[in-house]
Image (tube, rainbow, N blue to C red):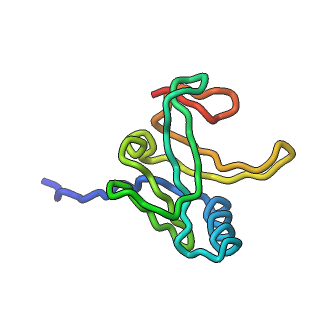
């Protein structure tokens, strides 16, 4: 008989590029309390869409994930859709943006900003 093993799910993974960008935003604003708010709303061409915002204030029911020099804030409704996702950051000819690779999504739109579960 094998022993039970505990598992603590990681709500989000953060790429090195995303972590560096959040840390840079904190430094630019000279505000160590600055966090990246990640949320999900209805809409987009696939049913749900991702959103990003800078957060300095927290609601009582927010989840804060500290990842090195970066911090992410997730509201309880969005949390369920984002568990296990990876947040990345890219800069290119089309501009700069945070993006999410979500293992819970059954389909996504072409630009990657909306998804369906």
- Asked whether 19 or 60 is in front, the reply is 60
Q: Is residue 70 above or below residue 78?
A: below
Residue 81, above or below 88: above
Residue 33 relative to residue 17: left or right: left
- Determine the residue located farthest toward the right in the rendered image: 93
Using the rendered view, name the quadrant where residue 16 is placed: bottom right
Question: What residue lies at 54% left-to-right and 30% top-to-bottom?
Answer: 115
Taking depth in this image into account, of 99 and 86 the one nearest to the observer is 99
Across and down, in percent, residue 84 comes to 44, 47
Q: Is residue 35 above or below residue 12?
A: below
Residue at 52% x, 49% y is 38
In the image, residue 19 sits, relative to residue 102, either above or below, namely below
User: Where's residue 43, x and y in %?
Assistant: 54, 27
Depth check: give the residue in front, 73 or 110.
73
86 or 52: which is nearer to us?
52
Q: Residue at (42%, 42%) from the top-left corner?
A: 78
Residue 64 figure quarter: bottom left
Residue 107 on image: x %, y % = 55, 26
Please state the horizontal and vertical placement of residue 58, each as a whole percent of the image.
42, 60
* Horizontal side, residue 21 vs residue 80: left or right: right
Q: Answer left or right for 60 relative to 34.
A: left
Quadrant of the frame with the C terminus:
top left
């Amino acid at each position: 008989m094998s022993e039970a093993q505990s598992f603590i799910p990681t709500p989000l993974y953060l790429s090195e590029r995303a972590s560096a960008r959040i840390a840079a935003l904190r430094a630019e604003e000279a505000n160590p309390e600055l966090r990246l708010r990640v949320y999900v709303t209805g809409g987009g061409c696939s049913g749900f869409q991702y959103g990003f915002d800078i957060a300095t204030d927290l609601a009582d029911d927010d989840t804060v994930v500290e990842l090195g020099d970066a911090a992410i804030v997730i509201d309880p409704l969005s949390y369920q859709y984002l568990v296990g996702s990876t947040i990345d950051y890219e800069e290119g000819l089309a501009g700069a943006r945070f993006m999410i690779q979500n293992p819970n999504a059954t389909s996504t739109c072409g630009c990657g900003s909306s998804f369906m579960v």
